[in-house]
Amino acid sequence: MTAQRRSWSHPRKRTYAGLFVALATVASVIGIGLTAQPAFAADTATVSASPGTVALSGPGDSKTLTVTVAPNVSPPPSPANITVAVSVGGGSASASDITISGSGSGCSAGVAGQPATCPITLNDTNPVTVNFTLKAASTIGDIVPGTTATFSSSTVSISGDATDSHGFTVTLKGPAPPPRRRSPVS
């Protein structure tokens, strides 16, 4: 007698097997509902930046970009662990001409076109503000003297328990043009 025929000749064993399958299915469905859910849904916080345009006036200049993360729901689920990232891009020159550093604890600097990041926690309905410093390199070789490069695809974004992004613009003036030489008068 084959194994399949033996299983059919013992109906009680078939009943237990069916019961086991049913219990395993119910347990997996209940387990799906009990899995850990993120503290925030993707659209429960927003990010904004001020000013909308950061104007660096030349080599070595630095300016502050204020980034605000605010909950969209009241009261928000808490706590929400979020990473704020600032990146400079989309320019007519190399983004490596600008370094970015965050002011908070645990922040990492953005160099050579990489974003700067800062971890934050939203605990209540109050927004969290992080300041980032954008600094032009002391020597800029890829912007024509006397002209300005515009980085129009720069972004601030949040990730983790909430996601959002917001664009801003960075302008960077190149080095001063060389002085004009006067022709000698004959």
Image (cartoon, grey):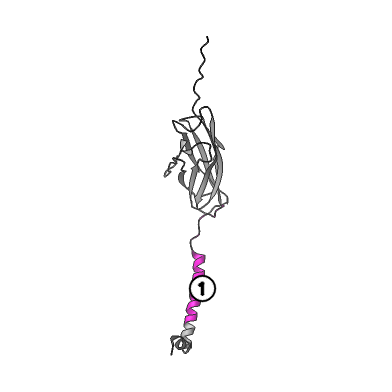
Placement of 140 over or under 110, stated as above or below: above
166 horizontally vs 119: left or right: right
Q: Is 30 part of what is drawn in magenta?
A: yes
Q: Which residue is mark 1?
A: 26
User: In the image, residue 106 lies at what x, y percent?
Assistant: 42, 45
Q: Which residues are magenta?
A: 17-43
Query: Alpha-carbon neighbours of circle 1 within 10 Å: few (<14), some, or many (≥20)?
Result: few
Residue 113 drawn at (x, y percent): 47, 41
Q: What is the three-letter code of the residue carrying label 1?
A: Val
State the SS at label 1: helix
Who's the residue at 47% across and 37% down the image?
133
| Quarter of the figure with the N terminus | bottom left
Q: Is residue 22 above or below residue 100?
A: below
The residue that appears at 44% across and 88% down in the rendered structure is 2
Q: Position of residue 125 (x, y in %)?
A: 54, 48
In the image, is residue 28 part of the stretch drawn in magenta? yes
The correct choice, above or below, for 34 with respect to 126 in the image is below
Main SS of the magenta segment? helix
Residue 123 appears in view: no
The residue at the point 50 percent across, 50 percent down is 159
The one nearer the camera, 23 or 182, is 182
Camera-nearest residue between 55 and 93: 93
Relative to 82, is 53 above or below? Answer: above
- Is residue 23 visible in the rendered image? The answer is yes
